[in-house]
Image (spheres, rainbow, N blue to C red):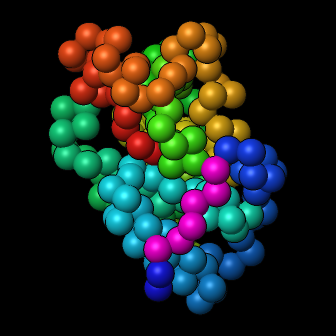
Amino acid sequence: MAILKIARMGHPVLKRRAAEVEDPTAPAIGRLVAGMIETIEDIDGSGLAAPQVHVGLRVVVFRVLPGRGGREGVPLTVLVNPRIEFLSEETTLDFEGCLSVPGFVGAVPRFRQVRYTAHGLDGAEFSREADGFHARVVQHECDHLDGILFPQRMTDMRAFGYVDEVRRALSPTLAARAGAAD
Ligand code: NI
């Protein structure tokens, strides 16, 4: 399986609502996920949604590397047909990047605490609660399935910019967090 080509902002596949997967156990879905995993590992990303590799299906892979947000991390997880419930109205603002918006970062409000439910490749449904960076990554990736990129979630476009410029302008603490590629 080769590294997959990433669709960039402006491509129609990133604007459409992705279709439900009828059979999460289908071999074609397994092959898609294998390619997405190889791609995310190659570019050292946190997450990837199928529309970002030009496939309009509701499939996400993500992981939280240890140390992100001072937590243990979340192992590589596959979400097929995911749904998100917001467990609190509280939002937090933090910087995000996106493989489909290369070179840019922006501060995006996200719900702090969520529960997500999805099918795995074995077809079984599972559910997890998440907060902090874990919750942020899942919201970012699931937005891709609805044709939404992170700049569309921003409430202050002054907090959008080239990653090196933003890093330079921020405090050292924030600079370390900026540029987290989702
Ligand atoms: Ni993204």
Location of the C terminus by quadrant is top left
Where, by quadrant of the figure, is residue 178 drawn? top left
Where, by quadrant of the figure, is residue 52 drawn? bottom right
Q: 69 left or right of 35?
A: left
> Closer to the camera, 97 or 109?
97
Q: Position of residue 34 (x, y in %)?
A: 46, 78
Please tell me which residue is depicted at 41% across the width and 43% down the height of the picture. 181
Q: Position of residue 88 (x, y in %)?
A: 52, 21
* Above/below status of 64 relative to 39: above
Residue 130 in view in this figure: no
* Above/below status of 48 relative to 116: below
Residue 96 in view in this figure: yes
Q: 88 left or right of 74?
A: right
* Above/below status of 121 relative to 138: below
Magenta stretch, residue numbers = 3-8
Please tell me which residue is depicted at 33% across the width and 21% down the height of the picture. 167
